[in-house]
Image: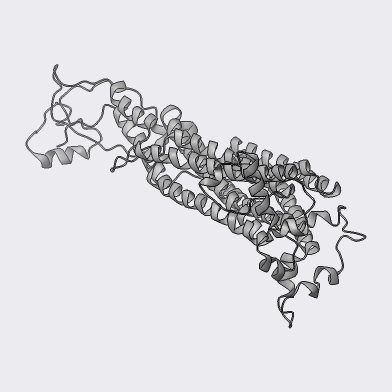
Amino acid sequence: MFSKTRFFFTKNSSVINMLAQNKGCRLSIASRHAVAPIRFSRLLNNFNLRIPRFYSTSVPLNNQNTTPIVSKVAPIAKNIAEGVKTSSSKPLVSNKSVAYWLICTSGLVFGIVVLGGLTRLTESGLSITEWKPVTGAIPPLNEAEWEAEFTKYKDSPEFKQLNSHITLEEFKFIFSMEWGHRLVGRCIGLFFVLPALYLWKTKKFSPHVGKRVIGLTGLLGLQGFIGWWMVKSGLDEDQLAERNSKPTVSQYRLTTHLGAAFLMYLGVLWTAFEILNENKFLKQAKKNPLALKKIISQLSSPAVKSVRSISTGLLWLAFVTAMSGGMVAGLDAGLIYNTFPHMGDDYIPSAGELMSPVFARKEDLSDMWWRNLLENPTTVQLVHRTLATTTFFAVLGAHMFAIKRKDLIPKQVMKSLHNVMGIVTLQVALGITTLIYLVPIPLAAAHQAGALALLTACLAFSAKLRKPRPQVVSYINKYMKDQLLAEVGGPTKKL
């Protein structure tokens, strides 16, 4: 009755509270304002947004602030476009420039991995017998300096046992290969550290990306040490005698060096993918919230959750297979049993050849089984074949599993999985061809590059399936709520 006669008690809060519970009452004598249609009403349940009810006893005056809706939304949209800030003035999501810098870094790491493979295939890795992190960047500049480096090489086990016939000109080639490999490593260090300092100074890093960059910087510095630790294993005559090996680097240290490079590559690229994905989510929240709602809903569905677990398994399987390939390279195991799918006359060599007591170092042979797995070229090649075959069929199975559920999986995720399927097929073909043709340098280098390409595809597949961080989801929810309130006129004076 009070509302229909436009009678209003401005001083009696109990009356107002009672009227507020009556849906037929209008709690203000002021005429209603025309408001923009609520375009986000269908998103409320999905983003858990609730519009608080605000009541006013004031009548709008002509001089009262009547800011247009667009001007109220603009600051929020600008905040989305530039990256939301935390309370400490650090961005919640890193700037896109950070992602582009990381992608360029990953490209350099990809290149040095391939160059390292070429250095290994041309047997150039032991040509530089000293480790000089700074002065080593300067190559020999005249004939006298070349002669001095050649003299140092003549004292190495590799020259004495394998390369005593090479000339100075031949030495210049292998020296240049190893020097170029080390120079690229130094350039990567500068390219990573210097922009990182600038981006940190200009506050382009989010807190969690800043921590990752610090960890990756440490890994990059450690990689240089691991590289020399690997080379030293091929220069130390005592270590060679203990391994009963020709002058070559330890397969364990070679695989450690390769693994650290792969981890650096994956860490840099994963961080870049995460930044790009989160910036895309923020952009969609501003431009197309319905599409964002659909994507987040799909990423949270049980079907995608199972595919996410599969993607993680494929990434780890591809990584372990690549590391077993490092063991094959370290032992030159690709130069034996150059047939496929047979190994000799059978599919699998005899048990005596796979588990030979020759590789044991203890009298009781207690270390025979694991030393054969890691030091017997025949067994190491069989392990790599088995892992490679398993990886191929695992990807094939995942591909078939996802195709049956393609209506429930985002299209970009399916596209990434198609890429994984194509690259793993190419990689298997390269591996078989490299083996059959006795490891020619171009094919072997392409096979190593293919391993990194497969890991890249698996990583991209996993990144597409990852849900945004809870902090980002929370911010998107808040943004939706603020924008919705701005569209309905915003909160007015509360009682």
Which of the pair 15/387 is nearer the observer? 387
Relative height, residue 334 to residue 177 (above, below): below
Residue at 71% from the left image edge and 41% from the top image edge: 423
Which of the pair 105/120 is nearer the observer? 120
Q: Is residue 319 visible?
A: yes
Give x and y (percent) for residue 142: 62, 39
Give x and y (percent) for residue 484: 33, 31
- Quarter of the image with the N terminus in it: top left
- Quarter of the image with the C terminus in it: top left
Residue at the far right in the pictured view: 345
Residue at 30% from the left image edge and 37% from the top image edge: 51
Relative height, residue 417 to residue 260 (above, below): above
Q: Is residue 94 left or right of residue 411?
A: left
Q: Is residue 337 left or right of residue 228?
A: right
Residue at the far front in the pictured view: 144
Q: Is residue 35 visible?
A: no
Residue at 49% from the left image edge and 49% from the top image edge: 216
Residue at the far top in the pictured view: 62
Q: Is residue 308 left or right of residue 430?
A: left
Give x and y (percent) for residue 378: 81, 62
Which of the pair 171/44 is nearer the observer? 171
Residue at 30% from the left image edge and 31% from the top image edge: 485
Tell me the quarter of the picture where residue 107 sits.
top right
Give x and y (percent) for residue 352: 85, 72
Residue at the far left in the pictured view: 11
